[in-house]
Image (cartoon, rainbow, N blue to C red):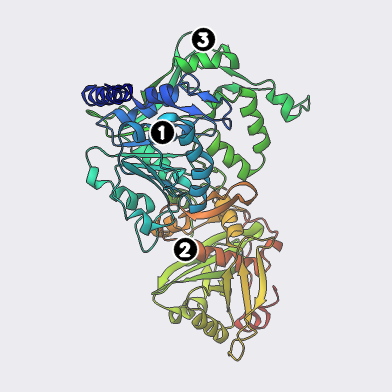
Amino acid sequence: MSSERQRRRQKTRNLFRRCLKASLSRPEQLTVSQWAEKYRILDESSSLPGHWHNDITPYLVGIMDCFNDPYIHFINFVKSTQVGGTEALINATGWIITKAPAPTMIVYPTDDLAKDISNDKLKPAYRQTPEIAERFFRTKSSELNLRFRNMNLYLRSGGSPSKLASKAIKYLFFDEIDKMAGASKKEASPYNLAVERTRTFKYSRKVYTCSTPTHRENYVWKFHERADEQRYYYVPCPHCGEYILLEWEQIKFADNDEKKLTNAERSATAMYFCQECGAAIEDKEKPAMLRRGEWRDVKKTCVGLPQRVSFHINALYSFFLTWRDIVFEFLDSKDDPEELQNFVNSWLGEPWEDTKLKTSAELVLARQAAETRGTVPEWAELLTAGVDVQENSVYIDIIAVGAGMTTQSVFHAQLMSLDDIPAYMTAEYSSASGRKFIVLLCLIDSGDQTDTVYDFCLQHEWAIACKGVAPNNNHYKISKINRTNARYDGQPLVLVDGSKYKDMIASRLHQPNGTGSCMVHADCDAEYAQQLTAEHKVAEGTGARRRLVWKPKTSHADNHYLDARVYATAAADIRGARSLTADITHQKQPEPSKTNEERKSGWLSGY
């Protein structure tokens, strides 16, 4: 037999042995965290390139291994920055690609972000790890469709509902879900649409949501509160051995009362003090604490095995941050509301609540005054009104205005149409002592039924059309209607910065009844109170575009009375309410009110 034939036979035997061994050998049983430590390779863009080590971020082990728990189907991760949330996602997808191939989707807030992460993070990570690279079909893959042996990994945007509803998915990931848009008027939320795609794998699916929180009503914190178990990472104090949570309140640093220290100098004094024994814990002791830490359920209401688990962790646990880094970030942020919200969300991993602007229906009802509906308080100097126009009705709010921009709702109602408004705007309202008032100015929203509103205001001297505008330097601006050949062309139009007036209303609701407060009459109903507080202020955008904006607390929340109150307050501003200086805590003697003729001749004087 020739040597060439022997070589070919030997190659055939070796191939047969490998195939037989592969078919008869037991598949390697690894959890996600074990897989990551054995196979994951970090590239040079990482701060610690080379093999993945669970000791660097030991708290991620419990999160990653939820993918191996057959009873857990929903995994939520409320996190701060610098704690490895994206790396945990990459590890989980790597395990899926190599150990449990199945249709997988990652949803990002936008298409651009999905493409950036695909090119800058996912593809390099998959190419760097040999176990994944040998299964990765690079030439057949696109930015948003990564193809592997036996499976596809789809990257989608939460802003493309049709794309979310087109695939059957077993493993579903949401990265930075709180930056994703909510429910639209036409379709369900991106989250609900995507989760519908997992129904085919109902008993084996995994849905992973991950984000720094924004506010309580958004996705990631809502999922945290609804979870069967809420898990927090407890670490042992190196001095007393008690397991504690690392909390911001336990970091202490120098005051700035006398020494006039810079932020850098103050942050250099930062130290963590154990809440159990009071001992100081240094940065160098943190890695050992993290390695010995454990996840504990703090909710303790789950009966049986949990299907939904949520994890929470803040920047104090980060291997890459010191106490000094965190304090410096706080000191640099504390005087700017937008920067402070970023610190609370992205560093503490907590939802933002501005206590100065935080409002509730209960707070409104606490501002009820002694006067009943329709009665003007004795301190009032004038009445103004605002109207929010909807498709099938209008909402009106008539307010009394006094010194210090003190306001109180005198009458509010939902009416069928604009034609019902004049009866309330031309009526006389009285105080308990008999002083007579009529509405001096009413601003009517022209965002809906624009032409009808313009025509209505042309017919009534006490009414002027208004329109909400983006935040600017002015609370309001007087403009003109520009409609060539229309009857109302050239008539006044008030451009209202609603954000500024909402700030004013929210902050003054916190002031006790009296000068400077925002009050309501004694018969105020719950519907008005709920609508007046239907919005809250949250941050949107990133970097230089990050801004605090007013948004509904819940999807489709009615805020019509809030808008009406905004317009009524703007009308008071136009009528010179800021120049009123009398102290409302002292009741004034009755004075004769302006006549209709005086009002009609002078209503534009406030311009």
Q: Mark 3 is on which residue type?
A: Pro
Q: Is residue 91 visible?
A: yes
Q: Secondary structure at mark 1?
A: helix
Crowding at label 2, few (<14), some or many (≥20) Cα neighbours within 10 Å? many
Q: Nearer the viewer, residue 258 or 188?
A: 188
Can you say whether 38 is above or below 364 in the image?
A: above
Q: Mark 3 against mark 2, which lies toward the viewer?
A: 3
- Please tell me which residue is depicted at 69% across the width and 60% down the height of the picture: 473
Q: CA distance from mark 3 to mark 1?
A: 40 Å
Report the residue marked by disc 2. 561
Q: Is residue 212 visible?
A: no
Q: Mark 3 against mark 1, which lies toward the viewer?
A: 1
Q: Which label's residue is closer to the chain start, 3 or 1?
A: 1
Can you say whether 228 is above or below 254 in the image?
A: below
Residue 330 image position (x, y, % from top left): 63, 33
Q: Which label's residue is closer to the chain start, 3 or 2?
A: 3
